[in-house]
Every structure is written in C-alpha cells, then in structure tokens.
Image (spheres, rainbow, N blue to C red):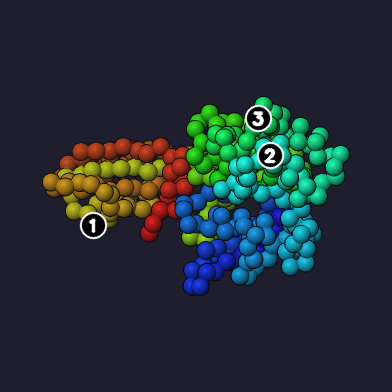
Amino acid sequence: MIHVESLTKCYGKLHAVNGISFDIRRGEVLGLLGPNGAGKTTTLRMLTGYLAPTSGTIRIGDLTPDRDLVGIKKKIGYLPESAPLYKDMLVHDYLLFAAGIREMEREARLSRMKELARLCGIDGIMHRTIGELSRGLKQRAGIASAMISDPEILILDEPTAGLDPNQVAEIRDIIRDAGREKTVILSTHILSEAEATCNRIMIIDRGRIVADDATIALTQAAGGRAVIHLELGKADPDAVAALLGTVEGVETVEHGEGGGQGLFRCRLLCRAVPGLRERIYGKIRETDWVLTEFHQETQTLETIFRELTREA
C-alpha cells in the first residue's frame, strides 16, 4: 500500500529525517512514536505531499509524488497536529465545505456527513459553531473532515494531544472503527494509546527508525528484558562494572543517578534469564560491598521507548 525507501529531509545541515525505509500494508494501524524533534511530523508531511523530500522514494499504491501528487492526496485523509478548523463556521457547513474541496458529488455529501456524524459522535453538534466547541469535540470534527471523502489512508498527527482521559478513549474508539476499513497512521506521545490502538509500532529517534514491529512482538520483547537498579556502599565503580559484567545475562553496567555519602548507584541492562537476580546477589556477597538497594524495573513499551530514544 505504502512504500518508502531511503527517505530524507534536510534543513541545511540538519537531517530531520535521515534515510528511513519502511512498508505499510493495507489495513494496518501504525503508531509512529518518538520524542519531540524526532522527525515524526516531517515524515507524515512528506507522506501527504505537504513537504517534498530532499531525497528518497515514496510510493502510494502505484502512484509517486513526482508523477501524480494530486492522485496521492485523493487517497489520503490528513489531520495535522493543529486541526485546520474555521472557528466561525458551523460544523455542518465546515464538513460540507471539506466535501466540496474533495470534489465529492453533491448527492453523496449529505449521506457521508450523516454517516460521519454518527461514527465520530458529533451528530448533536452539527449546527453549533466550531469556535464554541471543546477541544475534544473540535478533534472529532477534524477527524470527520479528514475522513469526509472516505479515503483509503488516514493520517493523524497527535490526534489525542491535550485531551482528557475520557476524550482520549472516545478518539481511540473512532480510530479503531476507522482501522477496520482503512490504513491508519497516527503519531502520538501517549504510549498506552499506541499499545491499545495500533497493531504495529514504529519508533523514530533523531530522524532514524530505531524499532519497527507488531505491537504484540514489541511488548513480548519487553518481557524478555530486565533492568536492575543497585545502590552499593564501599564499592569502586570500575570494580562493580568488571565483576557484575561477568554475570550471565548482564549486558551493560551503567552509572546511575544519585548516590552520595559513599554510596554508588548503578543500572544493569540484562536479558531476563532464569536465576538472574540470585546470581547478581551471589556476586555481591563475594565482596565487602554494602548492598543498600536492589530492585528490578518492570519492562513495558514505555521502558523500551526510553531505552531506544534516551540521549547518549
């Protein structure tokens, strides 16, 4: 459905997107995750044709932007992070306006608007002015406008940003319903939303893809990792790294934050192998170090995200 190869966007010497490649199949709901400035919005803007890439290839079905940009835009419904709503218009009039821009046939416009009013839960506000709506209702109206022409692909940039938990749950249901019939790409900072809504997750950091897999595969991978925090007294940092680095399953020993008063904190990045905690404790008992803290961090999608996107 969507093929991207070596996609790059540069602003002077800055590589906002740096040679990423991926494919999205029809019917997938893809969550695009990453910290601020990672390149998520730039990627979405290039997919929609809003920005031209510096280099690389985008293909939507059989179409490419250099040959048929208008044809690509007809296949895509796009909701930017700041929904482009006209605050003085009625919701009904705005959706009718959006349908006209999409060159929908007149007889199809009203029936499609009724369908979207039901799907997006805005049938009770169709004759209210957009400017007087809550943020959640504005987002619903924005999603309805993006879906007005029944596009094959729906691209949503931070659709739940700034919403309360109830509104987030409602938008999630709308996205799930849309995902039954369409290819959906959404960017978000809310990891629980991506986990609950998407069947595939792509994590991007500093313009590069650092993880791309089915949601269930990523969460299962999280269960195969362990992060253990230690606080030790009378311990030399180099000696701790040298000794605990020999324990089966321990891959990295990092200096942790805090400590003081003769205490040393460290963080062990490990494979979750049987007996890991016991072996680490056994190694510490062989020394004269004083163990004041020992706990294992629960690995979730959030901890995977932090591991892959934290600053070096």
Q: Is residue 24 above or below residue 302?
A: below
Q: Residue at x 24, y 38 (%)?
A: 293
* Tag 3: amino acid: Ile
Residue nearest the viewer, comparing 67 with 209: 67
Determine if residue 195 is in view.
Answer: no
Q: Where's residue 199, x and y in %?
A: 63, 41
Tell whether 118 sits left or right of 105: left
Q: Is residue 147 above or below residue 253?
A: above
Between circles 3 and 2, the one closer to the viewer is 3
CA distance for labels 3 and 1: 65 Å
Q: Is residue 209 above or below residue 177?
A: below
Q: Residue at x 64, y 66 (%)?
A: 52
Quadrant of the rendered structure where residue 108 is?
Answer: top right
At mark 2, the secondary structure is helix
At mark 1, the secondary structure is helix
**Residue assigned mark 2:** 144
Between circles 2 and 1, the one closer to the viewer is 2
**Residue assigned mark 3:** 125
- Disc on res. 238: 1
Q: Is residue 166 above or below residue 146?
A: above
Q: Residue at x 56, y 55 (%)?
A: 41
Residue nearest the viewer, comparing 136 with 217: 136
CA distance for labels 3 and 2: 13 Å
Sequence-first tag of 2 and 1: 2
